Amino acid sequence: MDGSQLKEKLTKKAQQLGIDKIGFASADPFLELKERLREQQERGFSSGFEEKDIELRTHPEKLMPMVKTIIAIAIAYPAKLSNPPKSTHGNYRGIFCRASWGTDYHQVLKQKLDDLAVYLHSLIPNATIQSMVDTGALSDRAVAERAGIGWSGKNTSIITEEFGSWVYLGEMLVDVYIPPDEPIEDGCGECTLCMTACPTGALVEPGRLDAQSCIAYLTQTKAMIPEKYRDKIGNRLYGCDTCQTVCPKNRKRYFDHQQALKPDGEKVKPLLKPLLKLSNRQFKEQYGSMSGSWRGKNPIQRNAIIALAHFKDKSAIPQLASMLQQDARPMIRGMIAWALGKIGGEEAEQSLQKAMKAEKDEMVIKEIQLAILKLKNRK
Ligand code: B12
Ligand code: SF4
Ligand code: SF4
């Protein structure tokens, strides 16, 4: 069988497997990306979540010496809740970004790639195959761009004609030659909506992200969130969708045909106060199947505290006050101190004063002092 026939067969099979887009790319080194990644590192714009070895990231042959082709896939994910639960006074909700809706996409894409690999092996039994989704060394976006899945937008997302940017990406390295597809034309034109809408100005140039100031990154960190970003986080518990929701290419791009990715409104827009009470085990039981749980419950609870401050939820003060005295995690106590300062009022101030007397952690003491000062200045 020649490469073109194989391409036809794989494309057909992909469709049967529920893969929304498939594209084929050469396995040549990604030289432009290499330069880009170096600049990102030098300017301090990397997130630290990506593979650090730039050579490995940009030379597919270092992952598979005989690699000839990279097969790229995209799976569309839902961008709209059919019946979203609403926040009400005293019962406020946070939000997980769309990339965390439904079953963890890593599993969903991995399964599709495994199914495609079984088929490829049935056609070419001795083919060498290596699949990856997100956590592999390669840049999934650079692969998808080269394979013609979509163009690389000014918000840095890969945007497809059919599904907008609401697609997950994955790829498969194979030691078989398959004729490559052509990249598609840039579709952003003069538009800059994502850049102006970004709450933190993290899109520093068209198509260049300072990950350190991107809310999607900040919500996943394990430490205190720098003061200047806290107000910008709003009620986001994990990730950020703003530069995609404003994108005109995503208008009316709502697809929920992937059963495994269908969201449960109560889970992706959970009530904030109950979230703070979860034990590790309960968190795992309730949220463990979502991609947004990969950093554990601490960052999500920290973000829930920021969200309660965002809503200035006075009904949360007793719970926050008791956690400020009892919670073993300084990061959580520090964040609560800030939140109480933001929510304000007599009760918040008294709980800060009380906690101040017993607190031993320097960072938390500083946060409490700042919060008290803020409340005094407000009087
Ligand atoms: C680290 C990482 C992050 C970091 C940094 C993101 C970033 N933009 O770099 C953080 C935590 C912030 C993040 C956030 C998100 N992420 Co993320 N992330 C990754 C990861 C692991 C590596 C990305 C990376 O290497 N970035 C470094 C930059 C420099 O490279 P790149 O974006 O991969 O490649 C592009 C640029 O280099 C550019 N480029 C190269 N040369 C040049 C030259 C010029 C002149 C220009 C203009 C551009 C350019 O073109 C490449 C192709 O687009 C990938 C998975 C993977 N293994 O690739 C997922 C991935 C990029 N993330 C994904 C998603 C869904 C998200 C979020 C939408 C989740 C959310 N809702 O919160 C946000 C989006 C934020 C944003 N604006 O990018 C998807 C993207 C799907 C898509 N349609 O594009 C990926 C591919 C995961 C997956 N397998 O589906 N992510
Ligand atoms: S994900 Fe949010 S913070 Fe990050 S670039 Fe997009 S709009 Fe800005
Ligand atoms: S908002 Fe405009 S500039 Fe940004 S990615 Fe979408 S089309 Fe491109």
Image: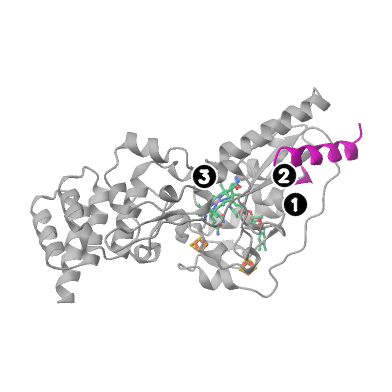
Mark 2 lies on residue: 72
Alpha carbon of mark 2 to alpha carbon of mark 1: how far? Answer: 9 Å
Residue 205 falls left or right of residue 361: right
* Residue at disc 1, CB closer than 8 Å to ligand 1: no
- Is the residue marked by circle 1 packed among few (<14), some (14-19), or many (20+) residues within 10 Å? many
Question: Mark 2 or mark 3, which has the lower sequence index?
Answer: 2
Q: Element at badge 1?
A: helix
Q: Amino acid at mark 3?
A: Gly
Alpha carbon of mark 2 to alpha carbon of mark 3: how far? Answer: 22 Å
* Residues at discs 2 and 1 in contact (Cβ within 8 Å): yes
Colour setup of the view: one colour
Magenta stretch in the rendered image: 1-27
Mark 3 lies on residue: 102
Mark 1 lies on residue: 146
> Residue 295: percent from the left, percent from the top?
42, 42
Residue placed at 54% from the left, 66% from the top? 203
